[in-house]
Image (cartoon, rainbow, N blue to C red):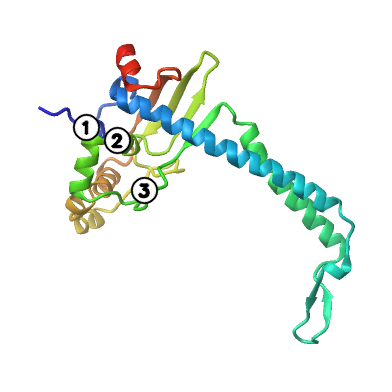
């Protein structure tokens, strides 16, 4: 008999009221390996964005140091048909400084969180409501990435000094970035029962938000960053 997919098993435990923390023991070795791959991929994207912002900061600094040139700051006044300054010198200087500070703030968000990686859904996941029934079942049995996305969703990975990685999250159905429960009226639930067949992910979310909006489980997964293959995870478990 085929193993129950991780996403289905965790959702079933959620419905039954299991409150124990979700750990690495709840995932297959392939899924644990995929988590590390997702984290590494996001780290690479973050490094590229950090480099881009660093270059942008240097560009913004040079721009801010340039003397105000009224001739490069002219726009056509539609009422008079005359070229007039877009900004005063004071307004222009403030604009340049504000722009520099904004880019520096964005860069700082990367430099100050080197030990944390926020992982989101894959770029190819275009439909937030999820796959249709047949494809969802198929992906649940064969795709570690799909199981992670439909179990953890967005998650934060914290790098530890001993080389391990800890994923801390909350298994619930609040929605990304929400701290308070999201409750769905019973009338909405009854009117969208078709989602059980057409969009099982959306149906599961709707079911949880209608009847179990305040329920959740802590997620505390520890990964060995050196054990990047399913085989080494299997041996460790």
Q: Is residue 19 left or right of residue 124?
A: left
Q: Viewer-nearest of labels 3 and 1? A: 3
Q: Residue 231's spot in the image, x, y percent? A: 31, 18
Which type of secondary structure does the marked residue at label 3 adopt? loop
Residue 15 seen by the camera: no
Q: Quadrant of the N terminus?
A: top left
Residue that badge 1 annotates: 5
Residue that badge 3 annotates: 125
Residue that badge 2 annotates: 147
Q: How many residues crowd mark 2 within 10 Å: few (<14), some (14–19), many (20+)?
A: many
Instruction: Residue at the far left: name it.
Output: 1
Q: Quadrant of the C terminus?
A: top left
Q: Residue 93's spot in the image, x, y percent? A: 84, 57
Q: Is residue 74 left or right of residue 230?
A: right
Residue 48 seen by the camera: yes
Q: Is residue 35 left or right of residue 10?
A: right
Q: CA distance from mark 2 to mark 3?
A: 13 Å
Label 2 near label 1: C-beta < 8 Å? yes
Q: Residue at x 23, y 57 (%)?
A: 187
Which type of secondary structure does the marked residue at label 1 adopt? loop
Of callouts 2 and 3, the N-terminal one:
3
Dot label at residue 112: none
Q: CA distance from mark 3 to mark 1?
A: 19 Å
Of callouts 1 and 2, the N-terminal one:
1
Q: How many residues crowd mark 1 within 10 Å: few (<14), some (14–19), many (20+)?
A: some
Residue 201 position (above or below residue 192): above
Of callouts 3 and 1, the N-terminal one:
1
Which type of secondary structure does the marked residue at label 2 adopt? helix
């Amino acid at each position: 008999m085929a193993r129950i997919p991780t996403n289905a098993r965790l959702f079933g435990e959620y419905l039954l009221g299991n409150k124990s923390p979700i750990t690495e023991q709840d995932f297959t070795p392939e899924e644990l390996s995929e988590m590390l791959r997702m984290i590494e991929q996001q780290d690479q994207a973050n490094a590229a964005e950090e480099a881009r912002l660093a270059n942008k900061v240097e560009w913004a600094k040079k721009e801010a140091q340039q003397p105000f040139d009224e001739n490069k700051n002219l726009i056509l006044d539609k009422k008079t048909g005359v070229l007039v300054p877009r900004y005063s010198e004071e307004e222009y200087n403030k604009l340049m400084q504000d722009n520099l500070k904004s880019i520096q703030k964005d860069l700082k968000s990367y430099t100050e969180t080197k030990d944390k990686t926020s992982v989101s859904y894959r770029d190819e996941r275009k439909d937030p409501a999820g796959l249709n029934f047949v494809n969802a079942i198929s992906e649940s049995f064969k795709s570690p990435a799909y199981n992670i996305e439909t179990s953890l969703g967005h998650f934060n990975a914290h790098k530890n000094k001993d080389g391990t990685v800890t994923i801390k999250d909350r298994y619930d159905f609040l929605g990304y970035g929400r701290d308070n429960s999201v409750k769905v009226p019973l009338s909405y639930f009854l009117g969208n029962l078709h989602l059980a067949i057409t969009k099982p992910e959306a149906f599961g979310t709707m079911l949880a938000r209608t009847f179990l909006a305040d329920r959740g489980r802590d997620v505390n997964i520890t990964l060995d960053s050196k054990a990047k293959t399913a085989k080494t995870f299997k041996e460790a478990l």
